[in-house]
Amino acid sequence: MGIGSRAARVDDVHESALGMPHVTVTHGPGGNPAYQVGGKSFVFFRNPRPDATDPDTGERYDDVIVFWVPSEADKQALVRDRATPFFTTPHFDGHLSVLLRGSRIGELSRQELVELVQDAWLSRASARRAATWLGTHPPA
């Protein structure tokens, strides 16, 4: 991690998502939050599902966070690199999102996580909202 950076925490997901404009929060059947812009989810916390399990025990992961990505190429870049904590499952084939376990979020820096949330928001926001935000937050 770079100078001045720290390991990401699950609380950073909430803080970063809520820090984006025009965000609403809904809650799924298990009470897990879903962050939306314009009625479209861009980050959500999954309930344990049979498609995301521990390969050794078969136990369902109870800490999976879903992030939208801008393109299939972005998704593949994240999930193919074994050095990253991102993954996908067959359930998400064709879906522009990546999965991350909360227990592995510390493998990212806070800045990397913030950028992931911002990219997720940009991929789901209207063109007008995205252009307005990018006008005041130029890419690094």
Image (cartoon, rainbow, N blue to C red):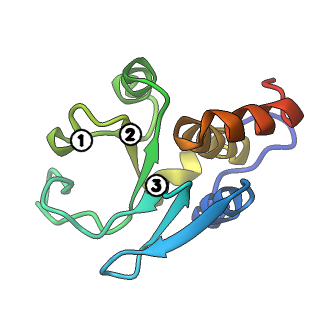
Residue at 56% x, 54% y: name it: 38
Q: Position of residue 59 (x, y in %)?
A: 16, 66
From the viewer's perspective, is 100 left or right of 13?
A: left
Question: What whole-number distance in Å separates the C-alpha atoms at marks 3 and 1?
Answer: 15 Å
Disc marking residue 41: 3
Cα–Cα span, label 2 and label 3: 11 Å
Please provide percent x and percent y for residue 62: 31, 69
| Type of the residue with mark 3 | Ser
Q: Amino acid at mark 2?
A: Ser
Residue type at the position of mark 1: Phe
Of the numbered discs 3 and 1, the one sitting upstream in the chain is 3
3D distance between C-alphas at marks 2 and 1: 7 Å
The earlier-in-sequence mark between 2 and 3 is 3
Image height check: is 98 above or below 17?
above
- Crowd class of label 3 (few under 14; some 14 to 19; many from 20; radius 10 Å): many
Q: Taking 102 as reference, is 138 above or below it?
A: above
**Secondary structure under the numbered disc 3 in the rendered image:** strand
What residue is rendered at 17% in x and 45% in y? 91
Location of the N terminus by quadrant is top right
**Image quarter (top left, top right, bottom left or bottom right) of the C terminus:** top right
Residue at 29% x, 70% y is: 47
Q: Pick whichever of labels 2 and 1 is earlier in the sequence.
A: 1
Instruction: Find residue 126 and report its image quarter.
Output: top right
List the residue tagged with mark 1.
92
| Residue denoted by label 2 | 97
**Position of residue 54 in the picture relative to residue 106 (left or right):** left
Q: Say few, some or many: other residues with alpha carbon within 10 Å of mark 2 (under 14 / 14 to 19 / 20 or more).
A: many
Foreground of the two, 119 or 128: 128
